[in-house]
Amino acid sequence: MRRRSGFPPPSFRANEGSMTSQPQSPLDAYESALVSGELRPQVAQRRAVEALEDLYRELSLPPAIQKRRRDAAARARRQGASAKASQQPVRRGGLLGWLAALFGGGRGGDGGSAEDEALAREATFARSLYLFGPVGRGKTTAMDLFYEALGPKKAQRRHFHEFMSELHADIHARREKGDARGDTAARFARAQAKRAKVLCFDEFFVNNIADATLLGRVLTVLIDEGVTVVTTSNQSPAELYPGGLKRELFLPTIALIEEEFSVVNLDHGQDYRLTGVADTEAWLQPLDDRSARLFRGLFEREAGRREGQPLQLSLLGRSLEVPEAVGRTALFRFADLCEAPLGRDDFQLLAQSFDRVFIDEIPVIRYANRESGERFRVMIDVLYEAGTCVYGRADAPIGELIRLEEHEMPPFLRTESRLVEMQ
């Protein structure tokens, strides 16, 4: 199994041996990765990179020009809303607006001025970007290229689940201290805005009422503070929080995203992770005596010993019991990791400690074990981002492992695809 990093390999960055420290743009880095063979050509991924390249170039403009374009876009939206309310046609920007002006839509047609035409040209600017499409379209790698081009001084890159957990923890801590002054979600968002003016979210997904309630307020404040928000998601904005409790309260947030973000659909082609992937010894099923012997043999081969030793990992007051470990190789049962009260921090400790993780006795994820299944999903995300090799012995093949209701499946589709790639 190859080791895979969740962030770009060194060749994605600026050429360290060159005379300049200027980073490559997202598109330049992508083209370099294609030439080196580190990435394969993929239509949907190129579409994502090109959208990020456009945004990167916008953000590279002088601040005064950026402000003018933002103001123009805001005026265009207000004019559009007014025209819609009065059922009057809305003046279009971009190519359509240019064609309309060229063929009779200019001063002599609808009374538009040169200022209106300039407004239409500049109103195409969208400061934030929402990339969505099924798993395996290369969204995360494309975002990595964008983040690397900007650098940590200009941008933060956050896993969305992690960000929302931090928001809830901040609100809880303030309440514990009796500090409930004002809008706590807004205060958190303003603090984030001071850290960087570009915020990259990976795996944008809403599956509970608490997140749905807070998200609109947080996004509104971030946008008001001038933050550029870039997200990847498996779902379109309109498909977020499907069938959720009191979903009507979340509809204004969907409207906010559709209005303030440039929304790019990457639903094109096949999941490139699944292309050419054959059965592999790293995932064994079903749970029978034969697979148990083979799985044990795999562990002994990777560990270089017949048996490992129990181990306790500790960090910042947290501890994790490891049933069997040899160097950077560890063996667990599914129950050890996913039926215990563990969270993302525990799984990050696991990823920091081991390069190869063997997980035995993985059951099919159904409604009855949905809670342990959610821990499994989070764990796979963490291990994938860390580049950890995962070996599994399960009750079913990867493609048949998750059997939940349709509205519960979206976040687990990514899990299946990542498990395949990790083979």
Image: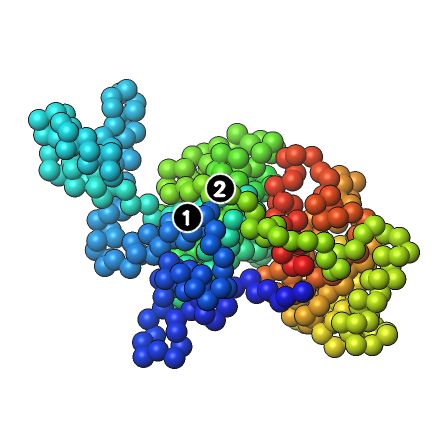
Distance, label 1 to label 2, CA atoms, is 10 Å
**From this viewpoint, is residue 337 visible?**
no
Please tell me in which quadrant of the rendered image residue 403 appears.
Answer: top right
Q: Position of residue 93 (x, y in %)?
A: 24, 37
Q: Position of residue 353 (x, y in %)?
A: 68, 72
**From this viewpoint, is residue 368 visible?**
yes
Tell me which residue sits at (39%, 74%) in the image: 15
Tell me which residue sits at (71%, 49%) in the image: 398
Residue 47 circle label: 1
| Whether residue 122 is situated above or below residue 20 in the rendered picture | above
**Which residue is identified by label 2?**
268
| Dot placed on the residue nearer the N-terminal end, 1 or 2 | 1
Q: Position of residue 158 (x, y in %)?
A: 51, 58
Q: Position of residue 384 (x, y in %)?
A: 62, 60
* Circle 2 Cα neighbour tier, 10 Å, few/some/many (<14 / 14–19 / ≥20): some
Tell me which residue sits at (44%, 45%) in the image: 130
399 to the left or right of 262: right
Q: Secondary structure at mark 2?
A: loop
Question: Which amino acid, by three-letter code, is at mark 1?
Answer: Arg
Question: Which amino acid, by three-letter code, is at mark 2?
Answer: His
Given the current orientation, which residue lies at the most extreme top position? 87
Front residue of 12 and 216? 12
